[in-house]
Amino acid sequence: MDILNTIVRVMNKEEVRNFKLWLNSTNASDERKDVQLFDYIRKSEERYDENYIFRKLYGADDKNSFYRLKHRLQEDLGCHLTLLHFDKQETNNLFLYLSLYNIFISRNQPQLALYYLKKAEKRASLTENFEMLDIIYANFVRLAADLPEINPETYIEKRRQNAVKLNQIRETDQVLAAVTYRLKLSQNYGKRDVGLLKLLDNTIKEFANDDSIKRSKSFQTRVFRAVSQVLIQNHNFTELEKYMLSTYNRFVEEHWFDKTNHETKLQMLVYIINALFKNRKFRESLDYAETLGEELSAFNNMLYDKYLFFYYNALIINYAQIDINRGLKALDELEKEMKGKKNAYYEFFIYLNKANLLFFQRKTNEAIRNLIKLNMNDYYKKADKSFKLKIAVAECIMHCESGDPETTVKRVEQVKKEFKEVLDAEDFKREVFVLNLIPKLCAVGDLQSNAKLLIGVKKFVSASVKPSVEDGEILRYRSWLAPKAGIPVETLGG
């Protein structure tokens, strides 16, 4: 990793502009080698060629001078970024005050050092930065030797009380780190049923010597956030369901939910709903969706607007599986709720889901019209090209089912041309297969009448595929093709 290049590449426009002003404030000149090197790194990005810029700046030799230039530029960037951002984060401010304390201590100016140490203490106390407070109190004790007005016993006691809080936090962080590591390890080796609740309990017992930590609402909230993210990233929805139900019920039994953590309650409900949905427990998922709907009005609708979309999303995804008409009704309700709220994503979500549900109702032309409307949507326009490709493939599937082979083949060719670069990537072999297959399906009509084509489709449908891959498909390709190949959809594995 080239540190200098990485620093330059992650700098934003404000940082670049301020750094150039800072450099030129001492000696403005286009001939400055540090300015030339900085500009070259910034503009070349991945095409950076060290030999080229070295020869441009120093000719054929003197590479040591070039390395010294790089080192000096890196040091200057570090100093400048520190100065530019010291007042933008509380921790940076604390380091600034402690730096000033050290400067004046080294100059034998204890009163000035005390002034900045007090400012550091005040800021650290306000932000509950217990680690920094430990350092600050240690400096007060040392400074007491030079200033009689400082009673070291006061700061010794403060440091002792702070150490209790600091040790609890450290222990909490250590338990969380151990839990997350062990959980990731078990997931990475494919142990889908890791006995999560037992793993958590054993890890907490092993690393948490303080019983108050295990019974702490704040600790259990942090565990919930860490563990749920690991399980979601690994698509382990079986363990996520068990864990979320256990955690939610514990919070309810302990009466830990109140106004201050109402959002945590809503987040837990959303995780439970989604886990149950992924595990195809649609009725149970809808039961928790109703609980979420009731909780939206709690505390004078405090989080109603923020979580209303999650409520309707829960209704739509579940009813799409068991009652398409009710799913379309939920989409209509969501559309009314969002009327007047200029939100391109909500509009996008409604069009896309309406297209899906109408397609499964065999209202293919209506479904296509909803997908076409997406082209005018601002969220769609800004979407990643790979996502647009998957929408386009879904549209081609719908055209294929519409019974208009001429339009279907024409649209497939348009999609192949528009997304040529994306389709060349390794990750989109499935989309390539479907796009190549659709014109052939249009030509043969019944898949069963073409043995060679049937074998290829059966191989595609029967092949193992990661759940995360199929989750990213707008219309699941295997679910669409399986009935055509005489394979029951419910038999499809991962």
Image: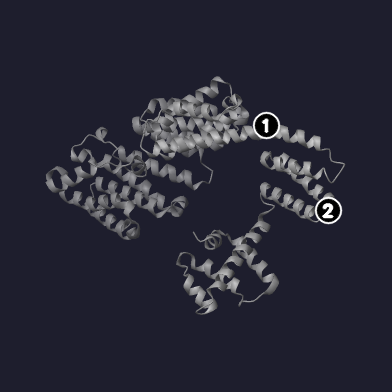
Q: What's the amino acid at mark 1? A: Val
* Figure quadrant of residue 234: top left
Residue 65 is at least partly visible in this image: yes
| Residue shown at the point (75%, 34%) measured from the top left | 158
Q: Position of residue 352 (x, y in %)?
A: 39, 44
Residue placed most toward the observer, 211 or 428: 211
The numbered dot on residue 196 is: none
SS assignment at label 1: helix
Residue 445 is at least partly visible in this image: no
* Figure quadrant of residue 474: top left
Q: Position of residue 83 (x, y in %)?
A: 68, 58
Residue at the front extreme, as displayed? 145
Q: Quadrant of the C terminus?
A: top left
Give left or right: position of 245 versus 253. left
Give left or right: position of 332 versus 145. left
Q: CA distance from mark 2 to mark 1?
A: 32 Å
Q: Position of residue 20 (x, y in %)?
A: 63, 68
* Figure quadrant of residue 73: bottom right
Q: Name which of mark 2 and mark 1 comes first in the sequence.
A: 2
| Residue shown at the point (46%, 50%) measured from the top left | 379
Q: Is residue 30 above or below residue 340?
A: below
Q: Residues within 10 Å of mark 1 (few under 14, many from 20)?
A: few
Q: What's the amino acid at mark 2? A: Gln
| Residue shown at the point (68%, 47%) measured from the top left | 90
Residue placed most toward the observer, 480 or 142: 142
Identify the residue position indicated by label 1 in the image.
164
Residue placed most toward the observer, 382 or 162: 162
Q: Residues within 10 Å of mark 2 (few under 14, many from 20)?
A: some
Identify the residue position indicated by label 2 in the image.
109
Give left or right: position of 247 versus 417. right
Q: Is residue 169 above or below residue 254?
A: below
